Amino acid sequence: MQDPFKGFNDDQNNNSDGPQGFPLPPNYATVVNPETGNMRIAKVGFSWTSFLFDAFPSIFRADWYNFLCMMGVELGVQMLLLMSVSGEAQLVQYTSALSFLLRVLWGSIYNMMYFKHLFNRGFVPADDRSRDLLTRAHYWSQPKEK
């Protein structure tokens, strides 16, 4: 996605933390791909949308890699559960418990997975504020000089 605010708000009033004068909450970071100019803005920390809606946030972000990873883990866990549990009542109980545990897991790590995948694709923090936030959350580590 290109910067939707390019050319607007060029009054040099840098009162906000986001790109091109776009105000960002304190727990959001901006990353940019220097080669293409693509920019992404996402939350750092627990993903309530992944907790509530499972893998749908990855679809809306067009994050197909993490979507397939999440679906693979969930399908693998469901297959193991189906092979190991014999009673139908037990299966229902274990399925609901595992579904809740997987939602807590995805809520806890999805934003980190998203940023790490972006970094692997060549994205870097867009500004010092985002770099500091990502470093404090252990999502970003400074690349080693050669």
Image (cartoon, grey):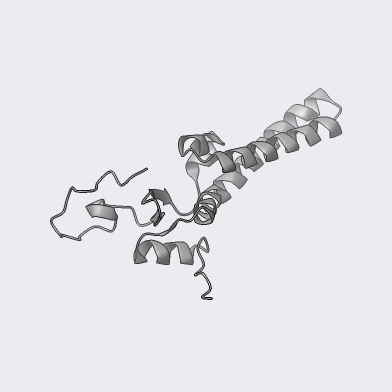
**Residue drawn at point x = 72 percent, y = 32 percent:** 95
Residue 82 located left or right of residue 20: right
Q: Depth check: 42 or 12 in front?
A: 12
**Residue drawn at point x = 64 percent, y = 36 percent:** 71
Please, is residue 103 above or below residue 23 in the view? above
Please, is residue 54 above or below residue 40 in the view? above
**Residue drawn at point x = 55 percent, y = 38 percent:** 64
Instruction: Point out the image quarter for the N terminus.
Output: top left
- Which percent across, then down, holds residue 43? 43, 50
Q: Residue furthest top?
A: 88
**Residue drawn at point x = 58 percent, y = 38 percent:** 67
Please, is residue 77 above or below residue 7 in the view? above
Residue 137 appears in view:
yes
- Which percent across, then down, holds residue 74? 68, 37
Residue 35 located left or right of residue 78: left
Instruction: Point out the image quarter for the C terminus.
Output: bottom right
- Which percent across, then down, holds residue 13? 15, 59
Please, is residue 102 above or below residue 36 in the view? above
